[in-house]
Amino acid sequence: MPMLVRKTQLLAKAETNEGTAETPGTADALLIFDSGFEPTVEMHERNPRRETLSKLITLAGRRSARMNFQCELHGSGTAGVAPPWGKLLKACGFAESISTGTSVTYSPASEDIDSLTLELRMDGVVKRIWGARGNVRLTLEGGKPGLLNFEFTGIDSEVEDDDLVSASYNATLPPVFLEASFVIDSYGALIERLEVNMNNELTLRPSVNTACGYSSVFISDRNPTATFDPEAVTVATKDFFSMWRTNAGIAMAATLGATAGNIIALSAPKTRLHEVRVDERAKIYTYPITALLAMNTGDDEFSITLT
């Protein structure tokens, strides 16, 4: 029988001991889109000098793997309860702060970052990675649900036969990116797209004491950026080019949803414009902008708050 792409599941579980694989259960399943799995095995050639040009068998060395997928951006349905994708965000360098019955906030962290065991169950075959940490890129487009694009690197992987699980998924519908109250420097710019990329630098720690050749994956740096595409306006209305030339850090914010338990507020307190271009959308001039999300006091350059 063919293995159907649609019959794919992701299971994710935080590790008690970093780099020691957990066993995710049915409660650890998440709804995902556009998944991928890419194992890596370093292959070492052996080319001694001898009487023939024929090759010797290569040797398998260090192993690692990457896994990518998308999740819809939505709340848990209950204010003050973490969303299903919260554990993924924590392994991408975010800290989680819960105010019971009120809110859940995710902001960048520089230490105590979770590692995950991830299983991609692909219609009868499971691809598993562990010791995994990752990067997240948030994409928002007018009239569509927001997407969290995840890419994880694990210290090792395995592939084996196993069935899909009888999962129970969170049924909260994702809000679409409309009535978003998008503001940049207190100006309600007309945009169609907004993207935030944490640009985490993922580094494998070599170790000859492990079977895979690595002890862990850690986030060694981050360079969070935002891109958005405001409609062009007069200088008197909003001078984006002047903000670019000066060393100003300006606030940016947007909100998705209006129902308690599914309201998502995005905030960047010091957005530093790095590039302002001229383009067009529907025969109207636009100013596509790339910006750095800079710190205010530290570990606060971007936040997601769910209420």
Image (tube, rainbow, N blue to C red):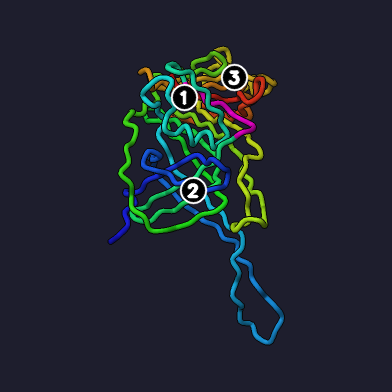
Disc 1 on helix, strand or loop? loop
Find numbered disc 2 in the image and state the secondary structure of the residue it sits on. Answer: strand
Q: Are marks 3 and 1 in contact (CB under 8 Å)?
A: no
Q: Give the amino acid type for the residue marked by disc 2 in the picture.
A: Met
Marks 3 and 1, the one that precedes in the sequence: 1
* Magenta part of the chain: 104-112
| Nearer to us in this view, 21 or 253 | 21
- Residues 149 and 305: in front is 305
Most distant residue in the right direction: 49
Q: Residue at x 42, y 47 (%)?
A: 35
Q: Neighbour class for label 1 at 10 Å: few (<14), some, many (≥20)?
A: some
- Mark 3 and mark 2 lie on one chain; the one further toward the N terminus is 2
Give the mark nearest the N terminus, 1 or 2: 2
Measured in 3D between alpha carbons, the distance from the residue under mark 3 to the one under mark 2, in whole angstroms, is: 31 Å
Residue 135 percent coordinates (x, y): 55, 39
Q: Amino acid at mark 1?
A: Ile
Q: Find residue 191 and name its label.
A: 1
Residue 25: x, y in percent? 39, 43
The residue under the point 52% across, 14% down is: 187
Name the disc covering residue 269, or none. 3
Q: Is residue 197 magenta?
A: no
Q: What is the tally of numbered marks visible in this picture?
A: 3
Of circles 1 and 2, the one toward us is 2
- Three-letter amino acid code at the position of disc 3: Pro
Residue 148, percent from left and from top: 46, 35
